[in-house]
Image (tube, grey):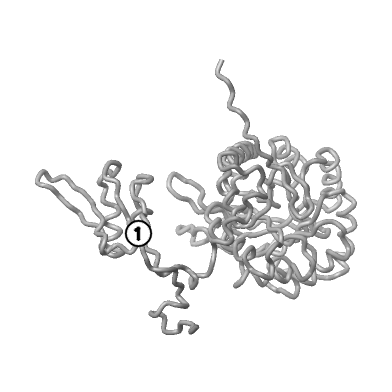
């Protein structure tokens, strides 16, 4: 019998803003966390925590039909997911009862309650003691919902106003004794301003990003966007793999901002596998939340996420998430501080090149004409980099369908580091 693979000797458990969890993978506040049935199935599958779908005041929100749409890639791969669903449409009493029961049955899992009520102190004062009585580990303030709720003065209407972010956070810290996580909207000019406001209000952590305003597609026969409600539609909240680059940038901005440095960050946005989670952690996240990937593939994806992350950590010598969380932050800077003297040049591995010509077409038509197309006497093609013309833009490497066929080779240089601030070509360079 074949011996089973040895389990990696790493510890995936975390403590995030005072909340303990057996692993960093949490389900985000969304349809997958709307009821006890879903949440318990998620815990059975191995999720370390959940953020219960956003609770509000009674009467509960009323949702429309239909609610979801998608931006598709080849073979109907879902690149981005759009929804116009509101917060929970179940009563506050039912939700609170189920939260209490689930936490009793799963005491080792992180259970966070997402909340959204009117921006009035009495509303927060009334709901917070009821939430605390459930035994849940903390709350997440939904200050980012981009549709439906902002028209009522909630969601992104609060998250786009630093004064309101600070005020609501302060109320929650006053009337609730457990950790308060503030979920931030990406529909804002500078995410750092919102994070700073949350910190001033006493937030124990922030989570981001919430969904992005979007319209994914148009039914050109009926001239209406999707999802369609009757013969109308509206903008919704965009999530899924397509938003990951935006989310990582915003996480990094908060992690490297001197005013919010050290503020715990829960990363959200397009996390579909262990590598995505590791990348968010490298940029400062101490935990991650997943939604779209679970909705598309089911709760069991967390098994591969845990296994993949543990194996990578063991390979790199990391015993815990904390050992590499934030390691990429110090290497992330403003453009003006990049080394103007650094140079890299593309190199094509002729042994793996399939002579498709995609690199040549891309470079010749849209870049720097630095790839030569050579044809021998027999008519065979060959592509070579014209090194003196190559600016190291990476376009050829990106368009190449063969992984590692084109590499970017750093060039030796005796020139010292020089930022744009010091560059003599900068007409506004800073004098010594």
- The tally of labels here is 1
Q: Can you tell which quarter of the image residue 186 is in? A: bottom right
203 horizontally vs 244: left or right = right
327 horizontally vs 33: left or right = left
Q: Can you tell which quarter of the image residue 101 is in? A: top right
Residue 156 vertical placement versus 245 (above, below): below
Residue 311 vertical placement versus 398 (above, below): above
Tag 1, which secondary structure? Answer: loop
- Any part of residue 64 in sight: no
Residue 395 in the image: state x and y as whole percent: 36, 58
Q: Nearer the viewer, residue 354 or 14?
A: 14
**Residue at figure coordinates x 82%, y 41% from the top left:** 107
136 horizontally vs 143: left or right = right
Disc 1: which residue: 411
- Any part of residue 161 in sight: yes
Residue 133 in the image: state x and y as whole percent: 90, 51
Residue 421 vertical placement versus 267 (above, below): below
- Crowding at dot 1, Cα within 10 Å, few <14 / some 14-19 / many 20+, comes out as few
Q: Nearer the viewer, residue 80 or 360?
A: 360
């Amino acid at each position: 019998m074949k011996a089973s693979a040895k389990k990696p000797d790493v510890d995936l458990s975390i403590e995030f803003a005072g909340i303990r969890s057996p692993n960093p993978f949490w389900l985000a506040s969304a349809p997958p966390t709307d009821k006890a049935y879903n949440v318990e199935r998620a815990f059975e599958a191995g999720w370390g925590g959940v953020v219960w779908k956003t609770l509000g005041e009674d009467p509960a929100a009323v949702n429309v039909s239909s609610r979801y749409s998608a931006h598709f890639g080849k073979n109907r791969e879902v690149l981005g997911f759009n929804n116009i669903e509101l917060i929970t449409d179940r009563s506050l009493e039912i939700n609170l009862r189920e939260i209490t029961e689930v936490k009793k049955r799963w005491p080792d899992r992180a259970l966070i309650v997402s909340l959204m009520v009117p921006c009035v102190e009495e509303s927060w004062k009334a709901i917070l003691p009821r939430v605390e009585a459930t035994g849940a580990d903390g709350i997440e303030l939904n200050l980012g919902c981009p549709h439906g709720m902002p028209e009522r003065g909630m969601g992104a209407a609060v998250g786009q106003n630093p004064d309101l972010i600070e005020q609501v956070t302060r109320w929650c810290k006053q009337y609730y004794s457990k950790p308060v996580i503030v979920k931030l909207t990406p529909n804002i000019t500078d995410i750092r301003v919102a994070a700073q406001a949350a910190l001033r209000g006493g937030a124990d952590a922030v989570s981001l990003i919430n969904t992005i305003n979007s319209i994914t597609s148009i039914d050109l026969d009926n001239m209406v966007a999707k999802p369609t409600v009757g013969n109308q539609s509206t903008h919704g909240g965009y999530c899924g793999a397509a938003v990951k680059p935006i989310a990582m940038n915003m996480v990094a901005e908060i992690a490297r901002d001197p005013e919010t440095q050290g503020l715990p960050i829960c990363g959200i946005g397009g996390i579909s596998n262990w590598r995505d989670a590791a990348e968010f952690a490298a940029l400062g996240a101490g935990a991650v939340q997943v939604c779209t990937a679970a909705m598309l593939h089911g709760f069991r994806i967390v098994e591969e996420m845990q296994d993949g992350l543990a194996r990578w950590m063991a390979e790199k010598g990391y015993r815990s998430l904390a050992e590499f969380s934030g390691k990429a932050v110090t290497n992330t800077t403003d453009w003006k501080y990049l080394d103007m003297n650094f140079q890299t040049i593309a190199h094509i591995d002729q042994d793996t090149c399939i002579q498709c010509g995609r690199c040549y077409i891309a470079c010749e038509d849209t870049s720097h004409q630095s790839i030569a197309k050579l044809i021998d006497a027999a008519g065979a093609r060959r592509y070579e980099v014209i090194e003196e013309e190559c600016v190291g833009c990476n376009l050829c490497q990106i368009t190449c369908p063969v992984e590692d066929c084109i590499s970017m080779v750093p060039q030796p240089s005796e020139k010292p580091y020089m930022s744009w601030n010091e560059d003599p070509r900068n007409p506004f360079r800073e004098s010594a």
